[in-house]
């Protein structure tokens, strides 16, 4: 058991027999009454989102999870295919459990994967990912109004809004939480 006040982002909990991962946590200490936490929990199996409010002294059932390194091999539009780096055993993870991750995971890269009873609860992707621009519209000469942007498509198919000076073949850094352009990378 864990006290609700100790729950952090990424903590795995068992609620009504189902595993959930804490994706957001807000601590509230009102002037009157006892402190509480607002939690946003997500079920990796179903994608269901729960919003819970608990007093900080209340107990919640936490679960022991196992983090392992897995290499991302490919996806076949239904599953991610991953391989354990230490045993070379391959596993399949339903794409529906992590729909946006297909745009942020690159073939051959290693990711930390969280397991509970042989079920994948989470795939930890970095907060920023470097992409090569696969397709970019040409900027129109004279279209240089402050903040002018255009859409580009990255090597993984992610469409990102970028400044008009970004060209095909350039590398850009993208925030994985907001899917927003951060900066151009010259390497």
Image (cartoon, grey):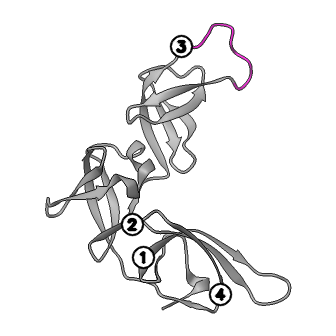
The residue carrying pointer 3 sits among few (fewer than 14), some (14 to 19) or many (20 or more) residues within 10 Å by Cα, namely few
On residue 19, the disc is 1
The residue depicted at 55 percent of the width and 26 percent of the height is: 151
Q: What SS does tag 4 mark?
A: loop
Q: Does the magenta stretch include residue 65?
A: no
Q: Looking at the image, do the residues carrying marks 3 and 1 touch, with CB atoms under 8 Å apart?
A: no
- In percent of width and height, residue 92 lies at 24, 57
Query: How crowded is the residue under tag 1: few (<14 C-alpha within 10 Å), some, or many (20+)?
Result: many
How far apart, in angstroms, are the residues tagged by discs 2 and 3? 42 Å
Q: Return the residue at label 4.
A: 56
Circle 2 packing at 10 Å, graded few (<14), some (14-19), many (20+), is: some
Of the two numbered discs 3 and 1 on the same chain, state the one appearing first in sequence: 1
Q: Is residue 11 left or right of residue 75?
A: right
In the rendered image, is residue 186 in sight? no
**Residue 6 falls in which quadrant of the image?**
bottom right
Q: Residue furthest top?
A: 141
Tell me how far mark 4 sits from mark 1, CA to CA: 20 Å
- The residue lying at 53 percent from left, 22 percent from top is 166
| Whether residue 115 is visible | yes
Give the residue number, with chain letter if any, for mark 2.
Answer: 45
State if disc 1 and disc 4 touch (CB < 8 Å).
no
Contact (CB < 8 A) between labels 2 and 4?
Answer: no
Q: Do the residues labelled 2 and 1 touch (CB within 8 Å)?
A: yes
**Disc 3 secondary structure class:** loop
Q: Give the range drawn in magenta.
A: 138-147
The earlier-in-sequence mark between 3 and 4 is 4
Find numbered disc 2 in the image and state the secondary structure of the residue it sits on: loop
């Amino acid at each position: 058991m864990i006290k609700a006040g100790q729950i952090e982002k990424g903590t795995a909990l068992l609620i009504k027999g189902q595993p959930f991962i804490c994706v957001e946590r807000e601590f509230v200490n009102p002037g009157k009454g006892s402190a509480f936490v607002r939690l946003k929990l997500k079920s990796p199996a179903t994608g269901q989102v729960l919003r819970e409010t608990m007093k900080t002294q209340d107990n919640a059932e936490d679960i022991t999870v196992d983090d392992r390194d897995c290499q991302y091999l490919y996806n076949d539009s239904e599953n991610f295919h991953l391989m354990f780096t230490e045993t070379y055993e391959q596993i399949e993870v339903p794409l529906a459990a992590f729909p946006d991750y297909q745009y942020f995971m690159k073939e051959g890269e290693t990711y930390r994967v969280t397991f509970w009873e042989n079920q994948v609860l989470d795939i930890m992707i970095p907060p920023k990912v470097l992409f090569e621009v696969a397709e970019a519209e040409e900027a129109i000469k004279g279209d240089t109004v402050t903040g002018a942007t255009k859409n580009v498509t990255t090597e993984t198919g992610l469409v990102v809004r970028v400044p008009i000076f970004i060209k095909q073949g350039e590398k850009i850094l993208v925030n994985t939480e907001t899917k927003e352009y951060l900066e151009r990378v010259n390497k």
